[in-house]
Amino acid sequence: MKRNRFGIDWTGTSGTQFWRRPQLGRRMFFRHMGAAVGGYFLMPTRPMETIAKAAASPIGRAKNCIFILLTGAPSHSDTFDLKEGSWTPSFFNPTSYGDLRFPQGLMPKIASQLDSVALLRSVRAWNTAHPLAQTWVQIGRNPVSGLSKVAPHIGSVVGMELSAKSPGQPLPAFMSLNAASGPGEGYFPPEYGPFYVSPGGGGLPNTRHPDGQSAFDRRYAMALDIDAEMRSSMAIGSPAQQLAKFVEQAHGMMYNADIDKIFTFDANMRNAYGNTGFGNACITARNLLKANMGTRFIQITFGSWDHHQNIYAANANLQIMARQFDNGLGQLLTDMRQDGTLDDTLILAMGEFGRTVGPLNSTAGRDHLLTQSVLVAGAKVSGKRVIGATDKQGLDILDPGWSGGREIKAEDIEATIYSALGIDWTTVRRDDPFKRGFEYVPQTGPVTYAPVHELWA
């Protein structure tokens, strides 16, 4: 058994396998009713409540968030923090956009949208183990700390906070695209957990009964009749009441033409976004926000960028990943600008850490490095803007570039998301099962984490 310095066995794990606690309410009842039944016994038994807040002032520039997790960790010095040297391939075509240097040849569509893009170049990860670091950026705290075992995904916090502003919507507040599992709702009610789907353009999967709608309606009515007595005696906020709400939401997604339309797109649309899984997810994200049916946080998982060897190989590795990323995100920015959703949506793209810099390693690749960069777009951020600076090769952070006066951490990114969406990042809840007080963004350690409001300077 191989263990790291945290005492965690990494043997045979992957980025999604690390998080192995029960997945409550992650599947709608038409997929795995057993998960819902399990959730009945494990749901919280008291209402959610917030009892402590500091004097924070969220900036509130966005209504929605698209979080793109670039699993495997892209090379920051080849993408969002371009550093040029003898190693730089000619196909990068480094180009100046004001004071910003960008690999136009690698990501031409995004280059054309840089007026809506800002780059955080003073970001530093906590760890370079893929599973640990991937979980860290999704829950905004150390995965091996005490409360992390019940900590919700950032998207679950967003969903819980913002769902109250638009009650009764048919779609889950948190959609996770192109992932099968991962950090979920933690100790929050299952309705705030991620809804996993890998869209292909043929509609929302598993929303049709194999025996037809009439058979489905008949059986659903029978289930309601059997449970009628139980439903009439449900206490508000009880596990039974939450389960009933969960099933009702799932039923609302069955045979719903408006919802199915979101997940349906033709070959022309797929081609416009690159005709890839990532492109399909970008199309779906655009449709979800345009439809405005309850989804407020969308995660798109896209990888792997783990290029330890032959990183510049022709039509492979970095080239093929960057091309897919550029086609998907570049077209998404274009279309969201046209349909008016870009200004209301915060978009972030980041890996779990960065990669070694300068000349390539002995296998013509790049290895793991804590220093990394993050792309931020939409939500009226100040475009063609760089926050922070690294040295000539991208190894060390020379200038943090923000009011925190230090390197930007995953917890600061988390605080930025909350603040942009109008959520008080200093919130402390007293409803966690350990009764220790759950902080939206950890603030009890030696560092005070804060939003990077310089994005809107």
Image (cartoon, rainbow, N blue to C red):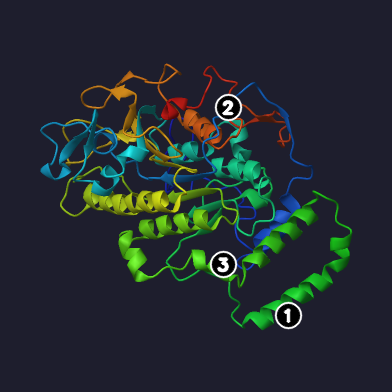
Is residue 43 found left or right of 260 in the rendered image?
right
Q: In the drawing, what numbered circle is on residue 442?
A: 2
Instruction: Identify the secondary structure beneath mark 2.
Output: loop
Which sits earlier in the primary sequence, circle 3 or circle 1? 1
Front one among 175 and 384: 384
Instruction: Identify the secondary structure beneath mark 3.
Output: helix
Instruction: Give the residue pinned by disc 3.
Output: 258
Q: Which amino acid does label 2 sit on?
A: Pro
Q: How far apart are marks 1 and 2 (CA)?
A: 49 Å
Instruction: Say if residue 273 shows up in the picture.
Output: yes
Instruction: Give the residue pinned by disc 1.
Output: 218
Is residue 234 found left or right of 344 in the rendered image?
right
Which sits earlier in the primary sequence, circle 1 or circle 2? 1
Vertical relation: 262 (above or below) 346 = below
For residue 81, which quarter of the picture? top left
Residue 367 placement (x, y as % from top left) = 27, 36
Determine the residue positioned at 41% across, 21% down.
Answer: 402
Q: What residue type is labelled 3?
A: Asp
Q: How far apart are marks 2 and 3 (CA)?
A: 39 Å
Q: In the drawing, what numbered circle is on residue 254?
A: none
Determine the residue positioned at 55% across, 37% down.
Answer: 421
Determine the residue positioned at 34% across, 70% down.
Answer: 267
